[in-house]
Amino acid sequence: MKHLYKKEDRYILFDGESLKIYEIPREEIENVKKIVENQNLKSNADLNNSELNLLQLDRLVLCVSDICNLNCKYCYLGNGDCNKNQKERNIMSKETLERTIDYILKLFPEGVKCIQFFGGEPLLNFDLLAYSVDYINRIFKETELEEPKYTIVTNGTLINDDVHRFFDKYFDRITISLDGRKHINDYNRCIKNSNMSIHDIIYNNIQRVNKDRKYKVDVQMTVTNKILEDFVDDPIDFKYIKSLNVDNIHISPLIETEYYQLEDRETQKLKIQKYFKKSLEIGWQEINETNYTKALSMVSMLRNKKTSDYFCRAGITDISVTANGEIYPCFMFMNNKEF
């Protein structure tokens, strides 16, 4: 298939067959449009949606703790309170964990590719984490299923030697939340009833595990108003996190909630787009396993002409379960009764 794009005053043609890009002269635009439309009408009839394996779950997210030890200003769950609209905050019990895994395997008899532990702060329920991995591996082995890969999203403040050894033994990768340099990170991210630096705790923990870890460490970086205040062309905080020798950096825009709003939304949106672009230019200067794999995946989809009805697979091959056992299509929707 061929696709025609307009970028400012230029017209670009992408040829899906050869994976080549052409700049089209302005005087030829109308002719090219007609050719592209006719060819794509014929091609669409031959394209099938990529098949989903509905017998296997891609990712199961287990929110093992509603509780968090931080009080981040921009927390989309309400300043670290994941159960803001409920009377009690919960941690997942062994019984809920067992019921969840047993139920998921009834729905998906070919197992789960990846299990991600989430919170609140999941390490506040470390005993359940350790029990979960042991229970899941035992059940999967008994049913002759391949053990899932384990990941976790954590604020990184509770990683001690025991946790590090646990990660080293069982985990494929971990994701730590860190927004940048000390004054940037600690402006929005703080410990409840304490003046301790979140940045310093996370920095020291990353340095400690980097000495001998077998698992990969990713950093989740949220682009906040504070980062954008003095940003012109140089994404200093992205480069700072990159200097910590982590494996990958996920950057995401701030999610506006009732608790935290973007200032001057339209201006900030343009700055965020520019920040992403500059960070991407830096990120692609170094080829690593993560971005290389993503690039190959995109090229493969283009070459094989695979399409999908689903932009997001939440609730299809991704499922999230709360600490009290409620099922949601995505962790972003947890405790939202509409979902």
Image (cartoon, rainbow, N blue to C red):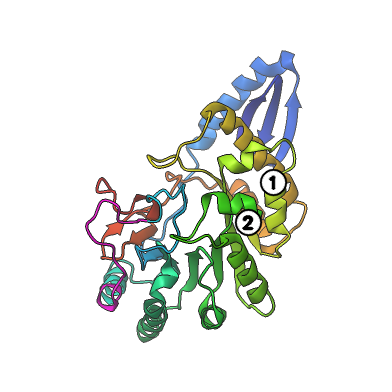
Q: Position of residue 325 (x, y in %)?
A: 26, 65
Residue beneath disc 1 = 279
The quadrant in which residue 213 appears is bottom right
Residue beneath disc 2 = 249
Q: Amino acid at mark 2?
A: Ile
Q: Image quadrant for the N terminus?
A: top right
| Residues at marks 1 and 2 touching, judged by CB atoms closer than 8 Å | yes
Q: Which residue is depicted at the point 66% across and 40% down?
A: 275
Q: Position of residue 304 (x, y in %)?
A: 59, 50
Residue 109, which numbered label?
Answer: none
Q: Position of residue 242 (x, y in %)?
A: 70, 58
Q: Main secondary structure of the magenta part?
A: loop
Q: Nearer the viewer, residue 311 or 329?
A: 329
Residue pushed farthest top?
27
Q: Nearer the viewer, residue 153 or 240?
A: 240
Residue pushed farthest left?
87
The answer to whether residue 94 is magenta is yes
Q: Amino acid at mark 1?
A: Ser
Q: Nearer the viewer, residue 281 or 149?
A: 281
The kind of secondary structure element at disc 2 is strand
Q: Which residue is depicted at the point 68% across and 30% down?
A: 13
The answer to whether residue 51 is magenta is no
